[in-house]
Image (cartoon, helix red, strand yellow):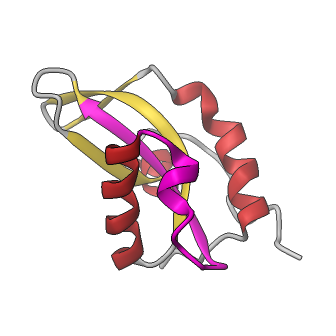
């Protein structure tokens, strides 16, 4: 089970993975273009609302400002190059599925 990040830790992870933006991501038979690597609320319910807001506003700050939380995750948000449908995957799952070695817990929160 994943543990949440502090906002500071999540921001560092986003910075480390920002080179993913505008690259392709294969999931099954679909190919996606990565649009963003963003900080999101940690709870699954809040993540769903955050993703909807992010896709509506196309702006991370607008999307997250309504959430008063202290526990965060990092999401990779992408769109299917054929259909335009969006998907989001948490950064740890993305890294694992793509063979990226990264110690997410190495930078312990204070």
Say which of 11 and 99 sits in front: 11
Q: Quadrant of residue 4?
A: bottom right
Residue 66 belongs to magenta span: yes
> Viewed as shown, does residue 38 lie left or right of 58?
right
Residue 20 belongs to magenta span: no
Q: Quadrant of the C terminus?
A: bottom right
Residue under the image location 75 percent in, 61 percent down: 9
Please provide the residue range marked out in magenta.
58-79
Say which of 59 and 25 sits in front: 59
Q: Is residue 37 above or below residue 52?
A: above
Q: Quadrant of residue 8?
A: bottom right
User: Picture coordinates of residue 16 (x, y %)?
Assistant: 70, 38
- Residue 64 visible in the current orientation: yes
Say which of 62 and 52 sits in front: 62
Residue under the image location 62 percent in, 45 percent down: 101
User: Picture coordinates of residue 76 (x, y %)?
Assistant: 45, 45
> Viewed as shown, does residue 3 lie left or right of 107?
left
Q: Is residue 69 above or below residue 29?
A: below
Say which of 12 and 1 sits in front: 12
- Residue 103 visible in the current orientation: no
Residue under the image location 52 percent in, 74 percent down: 2
Residue under the image location 60 percent in, 79 percent down: 69
Q: Which residue occupies the extreme right position in the image? A: 110
């Amino acid at each position: 089970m994943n543990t949440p990040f502090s906002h500071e830790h999540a921001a560092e992870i986003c910075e480390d993975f920002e080179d993913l933006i505008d690259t392709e991501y294969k999931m099954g038979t679909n190919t996606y273009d990565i649009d963003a690597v963003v900080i999101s609320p940690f709870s699954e319910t809040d993540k769903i609302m955050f993703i909807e807001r992010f896709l509506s506003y196309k702006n991370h700050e607008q999307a997250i400002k309504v959430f008063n939380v202290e526990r965060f995750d990092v999401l990779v948000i992408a769109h299917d190059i054929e259909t335009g449908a969006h998907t989001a995957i948490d950064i740890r799952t993305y890294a694992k599925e793509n063979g990226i070695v990264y110690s997410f817990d190495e930078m312990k929160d204070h």
